[in-house]
Image (cartoon, rainbow, N blue to C red):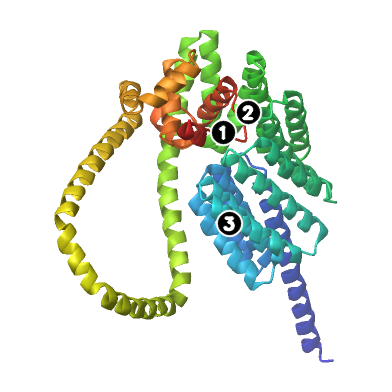
Amino acid sequence: MDPKRKLTLVIFIFSCTLFINAQEFSVKRIDSLISSSFQLADRNKAIEISQKTYKDSDNNGYYLGKAQSLKARINSYLGLGEQQKALETADLLLAIATKENDYYHSVQALIAKALAFSYLGFFDKAYETNKNAEKLCENVKDHDEFNSSMGQIYSGRSEIMNLQYLDSSKIIHNDLKSIEYYKKIKNEKKRNGWLAIQYSSLGYTYIDLEKYNDALASNRMAYSLAKKVNDSINQAFGLYGIGNTYLEMNKLDSSVHYYKQALPIFEKAQDMYRLQYIYEDLATIYEKFGEDKLYTFYSKKAKELSDITRKKEKIETDKVAKNILELEKTGWNKNLYYIIAGFLIFFAVKMYFTIRFFKRYKREKKEREAINDIQTDCLVTEFEQKINASFTELLELAKSNDSSFLSRFTEIYPDFHKKLTDKYPDMTSGQLAFCALLKLNFSTKEIASCSHISVRSVEMKKSRLRKQLNISSDVDLNNWMMNF
């Protein structure tokens, strides 16, 4: 071979080798960065990393890096309570995964969407999406990917039920099923990571069931497993669970100890919901200790976070509701014209014969009953106006947390008030006001909002009321009050 051609060939082969090695280095670096972002407590930093790895993966034509980057970003958005951004990113992941016939990441996108829907209160949409994820998961062939996905599906189902305040004895079935799938994962690091998350969730369910020793064991297991995989955020969840359990056991010093270990991690992660719960619990504890300054400090911080999260949830809920309606409208429009045409033809024919048959009868009846109808309408309208005015006034008093709410409620619902106080004479005015809100069918969130307390505090009040009135946990309190 000509020496020049030979030299050119050698240079070409060497250049190709360098290019391949550089690509391999870039891919390994991307994978390493994505993996580390999942374990960062600082979720904004994790988002920044995942955005960079997505861009690098796109430049390198590395699909898996793009998918994993989006998954990491979704994880951070959910942790920050940015549900709208989580949904948008999950839609992007679903789109690129569907194009690549990647069932695993398609399932991951649906799991994330189900969680985001549930956090925003769209529970029917959350269940539907969770079920779709389970059905699609049948196509996932990799052993560990299948079991981790199924574990997340059952864990997500448990979370949806928990957010609806359903019976904990039913929720625990999904928690245990999730752990069963996670235990089948062969990769030790991934297995420990997923189990750490789920044992925390199981611990909260045990707290609701008042099985405090089981709750402590589950949360300690969560902390231990998270520590093994160097996952600081899930260590914090384990510590929070232990602190929460000790609070329910009235071991307040122990509760403070663990809460204060978890607090700086959640502050770094900017987990507003968990921070709000800890601040509220610490305020409750310091109030019992008689430490007014600390009580005021933590109460103020809890209130500030509560106001922020409520505004944020309202904005995001409105946006997502609009998107859901648009999607449903698009689906309906495909067949709407045929449906409308069919109904119009049916009603046109029916109305033709009906009008023809009853025309004379209606005219005579109308003349005969005109005066009576006018008088009746006036009476009904006047009565409805009085009822609506009273009910509207009562709602406004409740929403503004007005001190006259209970006395006005007693005037409008005297029978309910008398029956309740006769049967339960030891009830305080605060408990009677709480029962009045339930009678008016206020939701847990609405009670929390108008009473300026947390959702968790409302749930604790409901739990105490159930015990006092001897009402089973499977009976809906609102229905019980409305039928009492």
How far apart, in angstroms, are the residues tagged by discs 3 and 2? 29 Å
Q: Which mark is residue 40?
A: none
Disc 1 element? helix
In the rendered image, residue 276, in percent from the top left (x then y), is placed at 51, 30
**Residue located beneath label 3 in the image:** 52
User: What residue appears at the point 75 percent right and 70 percent down from the top-left corner?
Assistant: 20
Task: Pick whichever, 270 or 220, lies toward us.
Answer: 220
Q: Which mark is residue 274?
A: 1
The amino acid on which the numbered mark 1 sits, given as a three-letter code, is Arg
Task: Pick whichever, 23 or 483, lies toward us.
Answer: 483
Instruction: Give the crowd class for mark 1: few <14, some 14-19, many >=20 residues within 10 Å.
Output: some
In the rendered image, residue 320, in percent from the top left (x then y), is placed at 45, 55
Does label 2 or label 1 sit earlier along the sequence?
Answer: 2
The amino acid on which the numbered mark 2 sits, given as a three-letter code, is Ala
The amino acid on which the numbered mark 3 sits, given as a three-letter code, is Lys
**Residue located beneath label 2 in the image:** 262
In the displayed image of the protein, which residue is found farthest to the bottom?
A: 1
